[in-house]
Image (cartoon, rainbow, N blue to C red):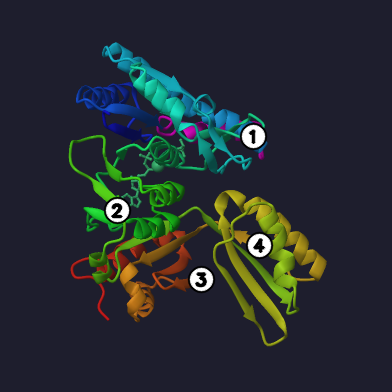
Amino acid sequence: MRPLVVQKYGGTSVGSIERIQEVARRVARTASEGNRVIAVVSAMSGETDRLLGLARGLSPRPTARESDVVVASGEQVSAALLSIALHERGVKACSFLGHQIRIHTDDAHGRARITAIDGDRLCGFLDGGDGVAVVAGFQGVNPAGDITTLGRGGSDTTAVAVAAATSADVCEIYTDVDGVYTTDPRICPSARKLERISYDEMLELASLGAKVLQIRSVEFAKRYGVRVHVRTSFAEDEGTWVVPEESTMEDVLVSGVAYDRDQAKITLTRVPDRPGLAARLFSPIAQQGIVVDMIIQNVGLDGSTDLTFTVPRADTDKALEIASEVSREVGAGAARSEGDITKVSVVGLGMRNHAGVAAQVFETLGREGINIQMISTSEIKVSVVIDAKYTELAVRVLHDKLVGDGGATT
Ligand code: ADP
Ligand code: ASP
Ligand code: MG
């Protein structure tokens, strides 16, 4: 059986007609080398934001169902364009939308989870000799037959899930950087490219905001053992392999720094200090499908508490509405939200066995005069919320102190 390669091309990689021709060249070459090829594509760069903007131009809160129909069109266009570009090169190809290859998802419009993919259908197409399958990323179909989308960055997940469903030999993620780095190379010049990164560390980096891979794609890769190779579509260089954990990695105390600008902070003051109040606030928030990340509660001397928590920025209005209602009901102060924050995290499996990283994080930020608004730690990460305007500075100083040349000391 010929090897099966899944190649995912992100927004910048298909960002113009010339770039799409370049992608077609690479796909054609991979096929001519004797591989079966599935190309998964994102919308052209900027297109998803443009489409969301069109919908919001008509309504501050368009329904999730119609939003998905609008934004999914971006990937439809690039899939067909790549297919046309392949035909021009004399390569047989056919584009497929999510519902055509039965990428089944749940009902959660805007952040749907893939529940099943009909891998046999894709394999049947490839084995039938009809050329390259070009799949629109980011989209699926729910049990009612409606179009859903998988959340920002979701084409990564389409690619890895398709690779898992078809037992592909490799899933190549082509993007605008040449691999996974110790932190975002676009804001930290001393970031180092990693030859390999373990599934667990990649999961942690992705969950903390490193958008080079969507977190769900890494979950799929780990669960199904998909070999993922993150690399650039602008050159031929080898990128970064995402691999099962290897013990050597534990020798490094801190393996990376990640940041997340897509969070907002909601604060309630003067909340009566009574049993059940946290449930009263967070149950309706959970029912709305809003994922709360950090929570801080402080009991004041007067018997009331202040409560601060973070939510994805896109959910700020909904979360604030719920918080305001609960505030009114229980006689607390007015709830308020703040969007100008960034969560910065240092991550490393090696931190399991060492103390002292948190202290070094606080000292390093303190020396730069960066105020820490919230803190959370686990055995392999330390996260802080800071003012968004210090994002680049914080990432650079933390990286240089804890990861760069020699890294952290204990
Ligand atoms: P694509 O459109 O190809 O999916 P994304 O913009 O979603 O590309 O992801 C690639 C971007 O991820 C890079 O341009 C880089 O700025 C950012 N990034 C954040 N953290 C990292 C990291 N640790 N390593 C590499 N890239 C990172
Ligand atoms: N086009 C979608 C986005 O911008 C999905 C993706 O690119 O992965 O988030
Ligand atoms: Mg992406």
What percent of the width, then of the height, locates residue 213?
A: 38, 47
| Prevailing secondary structure class for the magenta stretch in the rendered image | helix
Q: Nearer the viewer, residue 230 or 337?
A: 230
**Mark 3, residues whose alpha carbon is within 10 Å: few (<14), some, or many (≥20)?**
some
Q: Is residue 308 visible?
A: yes
- Extreme-front residue of the structure: 1
Q: Which residue is mark 1?
A: 143
**Mark 4, residues whose alpha carbon is within 10 Å: few (<14), some, or many (≥20)?**
some
Q: Earlier in the sequence, mark 1 or mark 3?
A: 1
What percent of the width, then of the height, locates residue 279?
A: 71, 68
Q: Which residues are magenta?
A: 42-61
Q: Which residue is mark 2?
A: 243
Q: Earlier in the sequence, mark 2 or mark 4?
A: 2
Residue 148 falls left or right of residue 305: left
Residue 386 falls left or right of residue 17: right
Q: Does the magenta run of residues contain 169?
A: no
Camera-near label (1 vs 4) is 1
Q: Nearer the viewer, residue 371 or 359?
A: 359
Mark 2 and 1 residues: CB-CB less than 8 Å, in contact?
no
| Secondary element at tag 1 | loop
Residue visible at 46% across and 62% down?
A: 343
- Tell me the amino acid under the disc marked 2: Val
Q: Which residue is mark 4?
A: 336
Q: Earlier in the sequence, mark 3 or mark 2?
A: 2
Q: Nearer the viewer, residue 180 or 397?
A: 180
Q: CA distance from mark 2 to mark 4?
A: 43 Å
Q: Which mark is drawn over residue 374?
A: 3
Q: Quadrant of the N terminus?
A: top left
Q: Quadrant of residue 61?
A: top right
Camera-near label (3 vs 4) is 3
| Secondary element at tag 2 | strand
Q: Earlier in the sequence, mark 1 or mark 4?
A: 1
